[in-house]
Amino acid sequence: MEENQQEMPFLDHLEILRWHIIRSLIAVAVLSIAAFVMKDIVFGVVILGPSKADFFSYRALCKAGEYFGTTAFCIDELPFIIQSRKMTGQFTMHILSSFVIGFVLAFPYAFWEFWRFIKPGLYATEKSASRGAVFWVTLLFALGIMFGYFLVCPISINFLSNYSLDPSIKNEFDIVSYVSTVTMLVLACGLMFQLPMVVLFLSRAGLVGPKSLKAFRRMAIVIILVVSAVITPPDLVSQILIALPLMFLYEISILVSGFVKTN
């Protein structure tokens, strides 16, 4: 650990941390304001995209089905409408969706600020071992966001909009419910894809190892299934779509931990 970091008073550390947090919040705020201004694109195209039959994922699914000689995967329409049942519903969801977009876009910079704060306190070997952390965290977060937005959200929305107890019951979703579901699924996927990086740092700290992760595998599967059930809509398809990649990431984490222990 660097000597100047060892001798720095605790209050000075807090002051440095405060400015890292302030800069991160400013980045989120600026990008959220930009998203708020670009309402037609952010809300009309991005947020409401999975609710439209011409969404990229639905068209790709249709083309994949046509490749195999079937149109069963083609979606002509989604049998639901979105309503706003509260006077402040649309405005509130406009603010929420803008903040989510701002957070997603600012996440790489915010993590970079966090990394700048903790990096000086690491030993030289720890710095070397954690080289590229910002890149991998950003990449995994981006992959998780895209997985949630282009796969989990469309399939969940399609399933729930077509699910019916009786033909006389029409699906009319509230805008608050729709936006909350989309943002929760997307952000959850983005954050849960950080599992390998979390295991990497815990392995570096000596808190976990490949043997303990393998011994904990059955319990981890149960936890993954429970988490998937909590963060997804109440349908089996969405839960499986979340659980399977998490199980895969857990196996990757075991390999990552084993690599750390052998180096």
Image: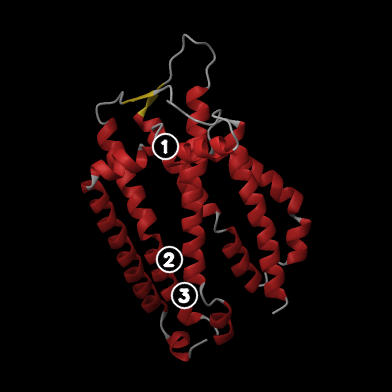
Q: Nearer the viewer, mark 2 or mark 3?
A: 2
Q: Are marks 1 and 2 in contact (CB under 8 Å)?
A: no
Q: Callout 1, which amino acid?
A: Pro
Rendering quarter of residue 96: top left
In terms of sequence position, does the residue under pointer 3 or pointer 1 come before the other?
1
Q: Is residue 12 left or right of residue 167?
A: left
| Image height of 231 relative to 116, above or below | above
In the rendered image, residue 172, in percent from the top left (x then y), is placed at 39, 21
| Mark drawn on residue 118 | 3
Task: Please state which of residues 17 and 110 is positioned toward the viewer in this rendering.
Answer: 110
User: Disc 1 and disc 2: Cα gap in Å?
Assistant: 28 Å
Helix, strand or loop under label 1: helix
Task: Please state which of residues 63 and 124 is positioned toward the viewer in this rendering.
Answer: 63
Q: Are marks 2 and 3 in contact (CB under 8 Å)?
A: no
Assess disc 2: are there few (<14), some (14-19) or many (≥20) residues with their C-alpha within 10 Å of its C-alpha. Answer: some
User: Disc 2 and disc 3: Cα gap in Å?
Assistant: 11 Å
In the rendered image, residue 137, in percent from the top left (x then y), is placed at 50, 64
The residue at which mark 1 appears reads as: 50
In the rendered image, residue 126, in percent from the top left (x then y), is placed at 57, 80
Q: Is residue 137 left or right of residue 228?
A: left
The residue at which mark 2 appears reads as: 111
Q: Callout 3, which amino acid?
A: Ile
User: Disc 3 and disc 1: Cα gap in Å?
Assistant: 39 Å
Q: Callout 2, which amino acid?
A: Phe
Helix, strand or loop under label 2: helix
Q: Nearer the viewer, mark 3 or mark 1?
A: 1
